[in-house]
Image (spheres, rainbow, N blue to C red):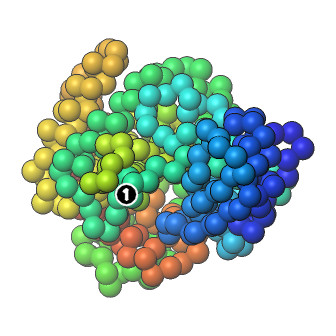
Amino acid sequence: MAGLTIPATVEDLTPDWLTRALAPRFGEASITSVQATSIGTGQVGENVRLQLDFSTPTSAPTRLVAKLPSTSETSRATAGALRTYEVEVRFYQELAAALPVRTPTCYHAAIDLSSNGYVLLLEDLAPAVQGDQLAGCTVDQAATAVLELPKLHAPRWNDPRLAEIGWLARANPEQEATMSALLSSLFPGFCERYRDRLAPEVVALGERLFARMEAYAAHRPGPWSIQHGDYRLDNLLFASAAGGDPVAVVDWQVVSHGPAVADVAYFLGAGLMPDDRRLHETSLVREYHRALCASGVVGYGWDDCWRDYRRYAFGGLVMAVGASMIVERTERGDDMFVAMASRHGRHALDLDAEQLLA
């Protein structure tokens, strides 16, 4: 909305500001009070639930979720360098409405690239409940999550126009080389911090992978589409006994133009406990492939899908190393990154993914 400032803090989400922000969608229904409650454990931004009171009856929602920049200077600087706030705002502004994947309705989105300030006002999806990356999920929940991905991937499968969207198609050879060098430099510190919590074979795998990181990052074959990039339990909301959609997808801060099946490997690699994954992953990936084909994707056989699933099993280990060393450190964050590295490392070993490294 033109002329509307971007709030710097939760305290700036005043009744007057919210009334003006929602006016294009719901008219001038006046908000008389707002109560904000922190939700989630986001390490890149601040998430709050807003309870709104109105002066007159209105179709506007009485509860919203607001997203703002992190109060941590380290996390905010990282978000600016990686463009994560910009990317999420653009996703809601330009792509979300045309995709059948379930995402929160966006009521207001704005960003100031000069200050790295941003705000999103999103649908509150409660009583759906957030997944738990540490606890993992059931096989039924995994199936639900995997079958949501074709709704993201299939509509723009191998669409060359995605490469023309600058904020989405962010990768180029120079950036990939820079990021590869950064990741390789971060791995020794990751090992120093977490080695005593990781299996020796996972550490050894990481040593081999990060020694070849530039070649790995430069070789990303396979069909490309809109890739969520962080499709894991903490970024999914599941129906509860009280209601909600079967699954909804949030946190679009690293969405990109990339290899679609990488999302599947990333989710299953850590979302399921290893024993459950080993028993069920082939059938779950087959269901994903069948849903792609049913959605109109052609020329992508099962053998191709399984090969790509194996190839991209390293994605979660790379994410665990990179994210853990550049965001604000927390106790739960440490536990989550160890779980991710352990499960994704074991996943890549189980699938002999090294065989497919460039």
| Residue 130 shown left or right of residue 95 in the figure | left
Q: Residue at x 54, y 78 (%)?
A: 329
x, y percent for residue 302: 21, 26
Q: Quadrant of the C terminus?
A: top left
| Residue 123 locus on image (x, y percent) | 55, 46
Q: Residue at x 48, y 23 (%)?
A: 156
Residue 157 in percent (x, y) is at 44, 23
**Foreground of the two, 228 or 117:** 117
Q: Is residue 296 above or below residue 312?
A: above
Q: Is residue 184 above or below residue 174?
A: below
Left or right of 22 in this view: 257: left
Q: Is residue 254 left or right of residue 144?
A: right
Residue found 24% across the figure and 58% down from its top: 137
The image quadrant of residue 306 is top left
User: Observer-nearest residue: 120 or 308?
Assistant: 120
**Residue 209 in the image, given as x and y percentages of width and height:** 38, 58
Of the 4 image quadrants, the one containing the N terminus is top right
- What's the residue type where badge 1 is placed? Val
- Residue at mark 1: 129
Q: Is residue 75 left or right of residue 255?
A: right
